[in-house]
Image (cartoon, rainbow, N blue to C red):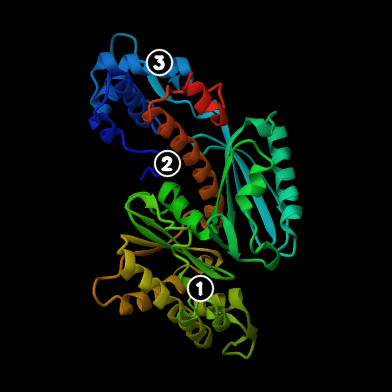
Amino acid sequence: MNLLFGGGELLLRQAGDQGRLRRLNSLAVLESVRDDALTIPQIAAVTGLSKTAADSVVSGLHDLGWVTVVEPLTASGAGRPAQRYRFNAAAAVVVGIDIGRHTSRAEIADLAGEVLASGEVPTSREDAPDELLTTVVGLVDELLAELRLDRTSVWAGGASIPAVVYHQTITSGPEKWTGFDLRAGFEQRFRCVFATENDSTLAAFAEAWKGSATAVGSLVYVHSGNRTGSGLVVDGSLFRGSSGAAGEIGALHVLGWETAQEHLKDVVSADGALLQRGEVFDAARRGDERAAAAVDAFAAALAPGIAALILTIDPELVVVGGGNVRAGETFLAPLRQHVAELCTVRPAPPLVASRLADRAPLTGAVGLAIASVLERLYSITSGGGAMPRTTVPPWEWQEAASR
């Protein structure tokens, strides 16, 4: 599923003058070559344009720097193989940041999400916002320096944080961060736009983009680790709700997500050993009945919240990520059973483990940064402005488009 750019067929159906039509055709062609290198006839077939029109649009996009020529495939017969064209993902870089409870990570990626540099730095929930941002931005500077770039090379950024982000302001999270505008904090340090989201929301985005849910249109993502959280993708789009708080069902104390971890603490095994979370899963896998009962109680505590989300948005898939997924079916099998028992008005959708594991929020942050670039390009170009050159950064696009 392509969450980052869309609407090629819709674009071609929209009415307008010849200039507008060409701009919309350019967006449709750009979308068609974002994932695969195509020849002019293939581009024409995907977009519905004539070969002549497709060739003209591709030529214009190439001149602007948005598409690049890819080496032809080996010829299978007589004649020279046709050239192929692809979205020029190397035109710029974006930054993805995952602010964790003990470690923060950052990645520099191209416009296709290909990671060019990555690193991590120790951080703490006790760090003041400005102190932590200085540390994280210092890491980004180091990664950019490895690529011989600087902050002005960054077209957009995305940041993940384990907290509730409401209208870009943290309303529930580390005590020192409550009321802090994370986006503004980053944008004071970069020229580009920064998007900030709760980590489970970005993980849901990542699963739909590059993870376990690329083939579905709607999903529920559940993070199960030191805490429990969720994120939603509905009809192919990240669902934030009216203010960014969609999916924060764990805030309802009655559902028990906040206390579910207690079932995995101080568990006494059959041989009298005192077990904690990871050890409980390991013992349950080996057949320890007391450990298995603790895992089952933990799964039963999570199930009502998951079932409530299922019955609210009717997703095609539930993806479970976070540290507890390392236990595999020892954890997922009882969770699946308890959720199924609660979904009485429809069969429960498949419940699967995340393929991205703990990388999901960071991957989502990168994807959100890319999406902000493409959405900006779409907005300017479809709104009447000329498609900018890739030598012009996004914060200058409006001015360049109006010339």
Q: Residues within 10 Å of mark 2 (few under 14, many from 20)?
A: many
Secondary structure type for disc 2:
loop
Q: Is residue 227 left or right of residue 57?
A: right
- Report which quarter residue 335 is drawn in: bottom left
Tag 3: residue type?
Answer: Gly
Q: Residue furthest top?
A: 79
- At x 26% / y 77%, what residue is drawn? 344
- Residue under pointer 2: 4
Tag 1: residue type?
Answer: Ala
- At x 26% / y 22%, what residue is drawn? 44
Q: Is residue 138 left or right of residue 39?
A: right
Q: Earlier in the sequence, mark 2 or mark 3?
A: 2
x, y (%) of residue 85? 40, 21
**On screen, residue 355 above or below 40:** below
- Residue under pointer 3: 60
- Report which quarter residue 142 is drawn in: top right
Q: Is residue 61 left or right of residue 128?
A: left
Residue 165 appears in the rendering:
yes
Tag 2: residue type?
Answer: Leu
- Residue under pointer 1: 251
Secondary structure type for disc 3:
helix
